[in-house]
Amino acid sequence: METVRVNTPNPSETRSKETALRDFVRFSWKATRGLVNQTENDIKKLVSALGNTGKITTDQEQKLIEQLSVRMKESRKQFENEIEGHIDTTVLKISKLYQEEISSIEASIAKLEQQFQNLK
């Protein structure tokens, strides 16, 4: 992922703010999902180590792994839904700001065009 200065005076020199924000969100999401997957693997290794040392039986090991996997999947799904909701809300807010800015610019252009017509 490239970094970009958000307050760059000339947007043609770098990627747009929207692209930078989108890339940042994608990168953050991938990193978060990677951490969740790593945690699942670590838990499985820990439970296997408990089984290998005789602290729990093979049946208990399998049941524990299954129970933890189910809980983690449910938690992950809930977490993903919450994140997606926050992302959707943020994107809508940003889109609204862009639309307001575009409307303001269009109004300024219309005003300047009217002034130009009055000069003719």
Image (spheres, rainbow, N blue to C red):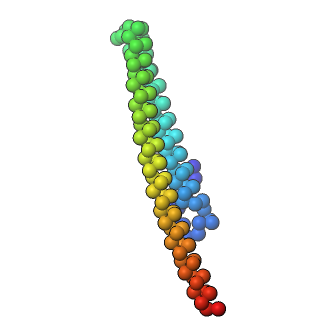
Residue pictured at 43% horizontal, 13% vertical: 62
Q: Which quarter of the figure has residue 50?
A: top left
Q: What residue is shown at x 44% (from left), y 50% (from top)? A: 89
- Residue 117 visible at all: yes
**Can you say whether 41 is above or below 111 in the image?**
above
Question: Which residue sits at x=47%, y=25%?
Answer: 41
Q: As drawn, is 24 to the left or to the right of 66?
A: right
Q: Nearer the viewer, residue 81 or 68?
A: 81
In the image, 55 versus 21, the foreground residue is 21
Q: Residue furthest right?
A: 120
Where, by quadrant of the figure, is residue 52 drawn? top left
In this view, the residue farthest toward the bottom is 119
Q: Nearer the viewer, residue 40 or 81?
A: 81
The spot of residue 83 in percent (x, y) is 44, 42
Place of residue 38 in the rendered image (x, y in percent of width and height, measured from the top left)? 47, 30
The C terminus is located in which quarter?
bottom right
Q: Nearer the viewer, residue 87 or 47?
A: 87
x%, y% of residue 7? 51, 66
What residue is at 43 percent from the left and 17 percent from the top?
A: 66
Percent position of residue 24, x then y:
52, 50
In the displayed structure, would residue 115 be above or below residue 58?
A: below
60 relative position to 115: left or right: left
Residue 53: tell me if it is visible. Answer: no
47 w.r.t. 95: above or below: above
Compared with 101, 89 (above or below) is above
